[in-house]
Amino acid sequence: MKYRLLFLLITTGLFQLSAQDQFSLEQAVGYGLTHHNNMKMNDLDYLSTEQTIREFKSTGMPKVKGGIDYSYYLAVPAQPVEDFISPSIYGVLFQENVIPERELAAPETFEFSFVQPNVLTANIGASIQLFDGTFIYGLKAAKLYKGLIKKERIQSEQTITTNVTKAYMSILVAEKNKEVISQNIKVLEKSLSDIKAVYQNGFAESLDVDRMQLSLETLQTQIGNLDQMIQLSYNLLKFQMNYPIDQNIVVTDNLESMVEQIIVDEITLDGPIDMSRRAEFSVIEVGQQLNELDYKRTKAGYLPTANAFINFQESLQRSNLFDNDEAGWLPTAVAGVSIKAPIYDGGMKKAQMENIKLKMNKTDLQKQDLERLITLQVRNSQRSIINARNTVNNSKKNLDLSQRIYDKTKIKFKEGIGSSIEVTQAEADLYQAQGNYINALYDLLIAKTDYNLALAKQ
């Protein structure tokens, strides 16, 4: 039973370990681009745009419609009709001397109806738009808007890539910091054990032990804080990837290899900038084209429109709808063309066109501002990454120097020719140099990320 329980515990632990997804930076970015809701919403917008284009196209397609109408007159409409038959007949009889001529009475008036109580009508008709200038430009604008959605999707990709990258790198830096502090704790624990032995032999003061004990406890506190920071960084990464927050993941990339690649990358200052690589620049260019099409569409409203139509109808009018002895179906067919021309609209189209011109001018100014902003971002990111690389190199030199000073100070202390204060100071300088170096690595990684974003590099 004991071995069985042990087996269950081991296999459960292995399952939990294997259940943790492992991600390189490239895989994390790919996961985010696939699962992030912003990308899904962009895809839905794209599909919606396709349906909008289909809807707009339908306005220029032939339309066919039919219907059946039935009416029953509760009161059949009638018209008063004067008796015009009797005078005509008597007039002929008088002329032919069939009967002696005499004065006729005033003709009577009676009701007469041309409508039967039951009316059944079946009809079918078709119409087609022959010409409408606004339709042509509207269709072009709808297709162009579809391209705009694609550009906005690229913009979302760039934003998600940047956010995932920064969150991923913050984990690498935090774990590197933890690794360094953990190593310092091991060294300090060994030193504390040694100083306690020296103290017990009467060759050191209790103050020396207390100082080293305080340094150890400080590092242990930092480790606890780092564990919390690492967990928060993982949560942020999962959020940016749209990964389940309560599930564990592991990052697999190595901090040093990423930094080495950045250091050897060639950075060119003051080179030409390809604005079209930036998605937001492409978006504003499409906006300019949409404004131009909107202006042409509105102007085309001054042109006449033409439509053709054809209708066919059959009607059945009977006193008794099912009496086949009465009159049958009566067909009617008509075809024609409708041409409409705008004459005066109160200046509405002119005002609309002037308003579109103002929008075009505003978009031009926005494009100029964006060009200046992109130039600023590219130039600043180029110089930032160069400065960050120099800072990493200098921090590494300072770290090596602090390590040598610390090692020599410890040797002097062990040989009895140095004080614990010197060791504590050298130790503080070393920890400061380690922190500066790790911060420099993080700044370099962030500078490279901003550089890629500025140049729209993946």
Image: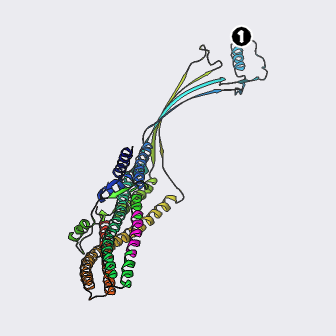
Q: What element carries label 1?
A: loop
- Please state which amino acid type lies under the numbered disc 1: Val
**Quarter of the image containing the N terminus?**
top left
Where is residue 273? Give x, y as percent.
27, 69
Left or right of 93 in this view: 146: left
Q: Is the magenta stretch mostly helix, strand or loop?
A: helix
Q: How many numbered marks does the figure carry?
A: 1
Q: Is 120 inside the magenta-drawn segment? A: no
Q: Visible in this render: residue 70?
A: yes
Q: In this view, does 420 lie above or below 13?
A: below
Q: Residue furthest bottom?
A: 417
Q: Is residue 249 above or below residue 173?
A: above
Where is residue 385? Give x, y as percent.
28, 73
- The residue nearer to you, when weighing 122 against 428, is 428
Q: In this view, does 163 lie above or below 63?
A: below
Magenta residue span: 217-231
- Residue drawn at x 38%, y 82% as measured from the top left: 211
- Residue drawn at x 70%, y 14% as measured from the top left: 93
Image quarter of residue 267: bottom left
